[in-house]
Image: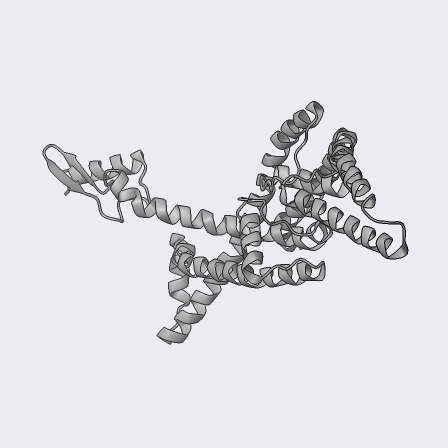
Amino acid sequence: MQVFCMRLKQYWRRPCTCITYTLVLIGYSVTGALIFMLSELNDSTRLKCVYDQRCLKERIRAIDQLSGLFTANSSNALKLLQVEDIINELDFCHRNSSGFVPKIFNYLDSMAYSISVYTTVGYGLLAPRTTFGRIATLIYGIIGIPLYMAFSMEVGDWIDEVFDSIAIWIRRKFQKKENKVDTTKLIEEELAHGTEAENSKGIQFGLICLLCFVYLSIFPVFVMFLERIKGNDWDYISSVHFVFASVTLIGFGDLMATREFYLTFLLPCIFVGQILLAVLITKMVTFIRNALAPYAEPSANVTPVIGKPVVCTDRSMSNKSKASVKDLNTCISSSLSPDR
């Protein structure tokens, strides 16, 4: 019973830790949204009013001048209303094409901004203008970025362990099927030397690549469907562009999903994608560093001693990819011993 409880505790340790991080991040986001809303709401509302009132007098004067050109009858009044609508449409088009439309820091927009700070995705659609808001962003990011990185690493390690177990299971199945021999002894030897996980790294990497490919292929379809519901004419490539910029933390800001859908449906999926891409990129970086290590550093397997090279075999060296100084000294001593 005690052994069962220990195994159960070990199994649930990682999920419980991830759940704890999730709850902390939710509370942190809610608190941050409240802080940013209180600090920026009045100033952003004032800027929006100034923006809406811009050129209002000019529009009214132009309409008054046009109204003087028409005689007072029902037909001319209708034409005047049509001209007024055209002027307002032109003004609206000009405002939207200018590239600057101030947004009010309401609670939902503040929530989206607070999440973009600690995830470092930073679409650039919202930015604080008050001194207090900018200082709050600085402090919020200093605390939130390490917290989110710790959460990502914890979940990433959990995913890595799951894929490691799946890769080992697949490798054992293929060994039994292809060799048609009892592989129990071979597996026990690999476990004793700690090499089974290393031999399954290729399968694990392939599984992660496949999952990331499926994610980047299917999730944009969901994004495109939601945006078309709101009347935004997003095609598949635009959705892929938005998803890739979000999960890789690039955040161009040229495309942004609808706020309601972003906070409720898309954001949890984007978190999953960020962690998956982080696991994949970490493994790719490790592979690149290991591949370039022989060209960047002298080989640890051949060391000149007293004018001639001493060759250290794999058995005399550590199983690690890079031998430590202690392993190297042991290898050299064994090569110079009288018994050899």
Q: Is residue 141 left or right of residue 77?
A: left
x, y percent for residue 198: 40, 54
Residue 8 shows up from this direction: no
Camera-side residue of 51 and 174: 51
The C terminus - image quarter: top left
Q: Residue furthest top?
A: 131
Q: Is residue 292 above or below residue 43?
A: below
- Of the pair 135 and 296, the residue shown nearer to us: 135
Q: Is residue 137 left or right of residue 75?
A: left
| Residue for point 63% across, 45% down | 97
Q: Is residue 167 left or right of residue 82?
A: left
Q: Is residue 156 above or below residue 133?
A: below
Residue 325 position by quadrant:
top left
Q: Position of residue 54 (x, y in %)?
A: 74, 35
| Residue 104 image-quadrant placement | top right
Residue 30 location (% of width, % of height): 75, 39
How far across and how far down the image is residue 244, in percent? 53, 52
In the rendered view, would you say 185 is above or below 267? below
**Quadrant (top left, top right, bottom left, bottom right) of the N terminus:** bottom right
Residue appearing at x 66%, y 38% in the figure: 126
Q: Residue furthest right?
A: 73
Question: Can residue 178 be seen?
Answer: yes
Asked which quadrant contains residue 101, the reply is: top right
Query: Who's the residue at 52% across and 53% down the image?
Result: 161
Horizontal side of residue 24 vs 217, given as left or right: right
